[in-house]
Image (cartoon, rainbow, N blue to C red):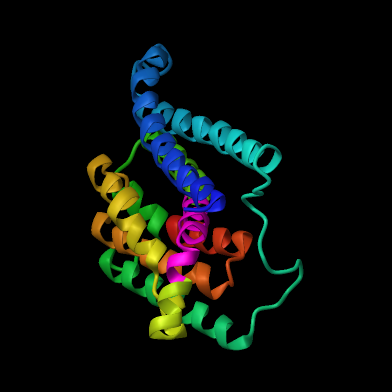
Amino acid sequence: MGLKNKKCMWLYLISMICIIVSTYAAKIIAPSLDFIGYSLMRPFFTELITALLWIVEIWVICHIYSKKMSYPIFQSPTESGYELPIKKVVMITVIVSAVIILIGAQIRFQVKPLYDLGEKFTGYDVYYYLGLWGRNAIKSFWIVIMLKAAHDCMDDFVSHRAAEKGDFIHFIPWAGICMICTLGIADLLMKSHTLPVTYLFLYLVYDELYLLTEHHMIKTLLLVLFLILF
């Protein structure tokens, strides 16, 4: 295994650990703020603290990898301002639209943020879901970081298989499969989403979007963010 593969493997593992540990750390810290709102604000503070811990961790990891390891995480291989081929734009549009229709059908075509809140909700529920949406927004960064790490780690394997089986191997969502078996399982155990099975298989979709954007981190991030929140 080359040096780059090791860097990427560790980046994937560290990201996974940070996501899980911070989630449980927030649950331990949040009760100390129960004097605000008589503990009714605890769910909100749990999500808020999780998001804040993730922001700090992402900043630290990106700084270390960029300055110390010469591996800028959010740098994309394509040039700034590069436009995707129309064929890929159409494919991305079809995939995103299909996911929206699929999720919409499961929630009876309600607006997803309103579906998450439910029919009856209090002001504390609104705070909680604001915290939840903020946490999910930050989680989008983790997802694209792990996609990049998984792809860069498996580059040699995929290239070798492509030489044997053909270029179509490059379009198999290897990283998405890896994320289902790791972060996806963790999501199920931590009950991170209201539609757990759907969001489990969305990791395959995220990976396909990463491939179609030609490994462009910001474009992938915006698409993942849109699908997670809406």
* Viewer-proximal residue among 8 and 37: 8
Residue at x-position 39% and y-position 26%: 26
Q: Where is residue 48 in the image (x, y as percent from the top left)?
A: 47, 31
Q: Can residue 218 be seen in this view?
A: yes
Q: Quadrant of residue 90?
A: bottom right
> In the picture provided, is 139 more to the left or to the right than 185?
right
Is residue 165 placed above or below 127 in the rendered structure? below
Dominant secondary-structure state across the stretch colored magenta: helix
Which residue is drawn at the image coordinates 24% and 59% (left, top)? 197
Q: Where is residue 175 in the image (x, y as percent from the top left)?
A: 41, 62
What residue is shown at x 37% (from left), y 15% (from top)? 34
The correct choice, above or below, for 61 with respect to 216 in the image is: above
Residue closer to the observer: 60 or 137: 60
Answer with left or right where residue 75 lies relative to residue 114.
right
| Residue at the far front in the pictured view | 1
Where residue 95 sits, quadrant-wise, is bottom left
Looking at this view, is 207 or 172 the one in front? 172
Across and down, in percent, residue 38 comes to 35, 15
Magenta segment boundaries in residue numbering: 143-158
User: Eyeballing the image, is 74 above or below 171?
Assistant: above
State the quadrant of the C terminus: bottom left
Please say whether residue 145 is one of the residues in the magenta stretch: yes
Q: Is residue 41 in sight in this rendering? A: no
Residue 53 included in the magenta stretch of the image: no
- Residue at (48, 61) in percent of width and height: 151
State how many labels appear. Answer: 0
x, y percentage for residue 43?
Answer: 35, 30
